[in-house]
Amino acid sequence: MFKRIATSRKARLSFDFEGHRLEAEDGDTVAAALLLAGERVLRSTAVSASERGPFCLMGVCFECLVEIDGIPNRQACMVKVLPGMRVRRQRGAARVGST
Amino acid sequence: MSAYDVAIIGAGPAGMAAAVEASRAGFSVVVFDEQDAPGGQIYRAIERADAGRLALMGEDYARGRALAEAFRTSSAVYMPGTIVWNVDASLRINYSGATGSGEVTAGSVIIATGAMERATPLPGWTLPGVMTAGALQILLKAHELVSDDTVLVGCGPLLFLVAQQMTEAGSPPRAVVETTAPGALRRALPHLFGALRAPAYLRKGLAMIRQLARAGVPVYRHAQAVAIEGREAAEAVSFTIKGQRHRISAGTVGLHQGVIPNQQITRLLGCEQDWSASQRCFVPRLDPFGETRIQNVYVAGDGAGIGGAVSAALGGRLAALRIAARAGKATTGEARSVMARLARDRAIRPFLEALYAPSDEVLVPADDTLVCRCEEVTAGQIREAVALGAPGPNQAKAFLRCGMGPCQGRICGPVVTEVIAAARRTPQDAVGYYRIRPPLKPLSVAEIAGLAPAAEGQPLD
């Protein structure tokens, strides 16, 4: 489990993940906020539906793809949490017009 | 469409230093950065770091702050949160960012896209909870997050640095499992004398290892047959040392086998590449100033071959000085003294490269280990494709779709080259690499369409 060891507090904000309300701090990426919340599975693969989570956290591996505010294929490690953001796991391949 | 004298891709130490020097020389400069603030990965979130985080990450990290300040006060146009998705031979750059897509042209381009971690294909490496050691460091550096159930596996200076930083943060890893082969130290010793030209690195390394010992972090050496166990997510790391199987429970696993240049843009441009046997990766062929065989295209920093942050900044400066000298501009620095400092700083590398050579298990994984994470292709399938006549990565890709998923081969590419080279008993540079094509990152159709009116003056609808 991840915990935060910050010495100075930043503004807090909340967002939605799979219908649950989660807290984040200003500056958190979606991937970081989800890991802190104990969410290790962010998607399942298009090939075998095996579950995956963040791997490189620097935009290289594309393992942390999620759906954000209805738009699929977003890299959770490259997107900052915004208040009220709606995040969902990406199950299998993204479908055009699925939302 | 805007035109700049110098376009720099990446805002890590190399990109920032290049931008400072090129601006000082009076050039118009644009800097593209995928991240939302300067620093690259090594100095990530440096501008937001408070005293506590600077102390935690150490003085080598804190050094990035002065560079970021110099970069911010320079006249360079900074484009954060912007992905460069094409660069062509006439130095036209296509990008996409918060304000949509755009195109610029440049007199010179400095590619400062840095390094990425070498892929570490092992049984279980796709399980959620398994990350790169660099990812764990990013969580600590940028978000002040640390996990309490971590085992670190692999080899290289970063593995020990992350272990030390986690310890400093009050959450030491449960163990460091080192995969270096017996005899690595003996092979590295001939390079020790040269490494003494950069003694600060040796001192830092020894201090890290001593701190881990003091904190009681177990270090397992010469581990083989490493596997990550778990049903839906990582539960444990198991490995063999001297015939004995070990198992340590872990919900978070940090893998590391060194870093390699990010090759996407140099490959896209068709820059010649050479195989580095000591760094075990491809490096672009460059002149002493960092210029590729394509005139006015430079590579600076770890993308030019792994040298670390100090060398990266020197390399960025050197490229900018070269561009200034070519244009007949007066410059404040001198290329010769920068080159001398670069040589001194890099003196540690042959020692580190010999000491922390990646393990064969990871370079040439077992048949049933996944190599391409996106398309789920195993090493065995690649060997079958070779047996059927696929001579290189591009044919394997046509057979199996490896490298055709969303990461576009970034992760599996170097492994596929190694697996084919070993299977064919052919050198890696003869086997080659995936052909890299635009767009360099997945784009929406809207992002491409958004570019069209500006580029051609013709709306698409």
Image: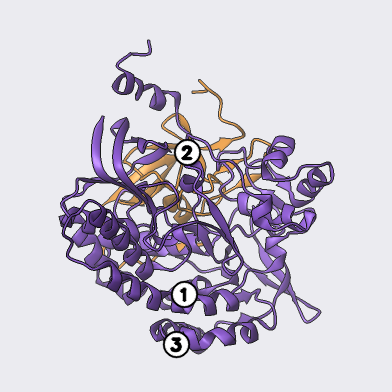
Disc nearer the start of the sequence (2/1): 1
Alpha-carbon distance for marks 3 and 2? 41 Å
The residue carrying mark 3 is B196
Parent chain of label 1:
B
Amino acid at dot 1: Leu
- Disc 1 element: helix
The residue carrying mark 2 is B441
Alpha-carbon distance for marks 1 and 3? 20 Å
Q: Residue at x 48, y 59 (%)?
A: B135
Instruction: Provide residue B437's location: percent of width, then percent of height.
Output: 52, 36
Parent chain of label 2:
B
Vertically, is B411 above or below B161?
above
The residue carrying mark 1 is B161
Q: Colour of chain A?
A: orange
Q: Mark 1, residues whose alpha carbon is within 10 Å: few (<14), some, or many (≥20)?
A: many
The answer as to whether the residues below labels 1 and 3 share one chain is yes
Parent chain of label 3:
B
Vertically, is B205 above or below A46?
below
Instruction: Provide residue A33's location: percent of width, then percent of height.
Output: 42, 51
In front of the other: label 3 or label 2? Answer: 3
- Would you say residue B344 is visible in this rendering? yes
- Disc 3 element: loop
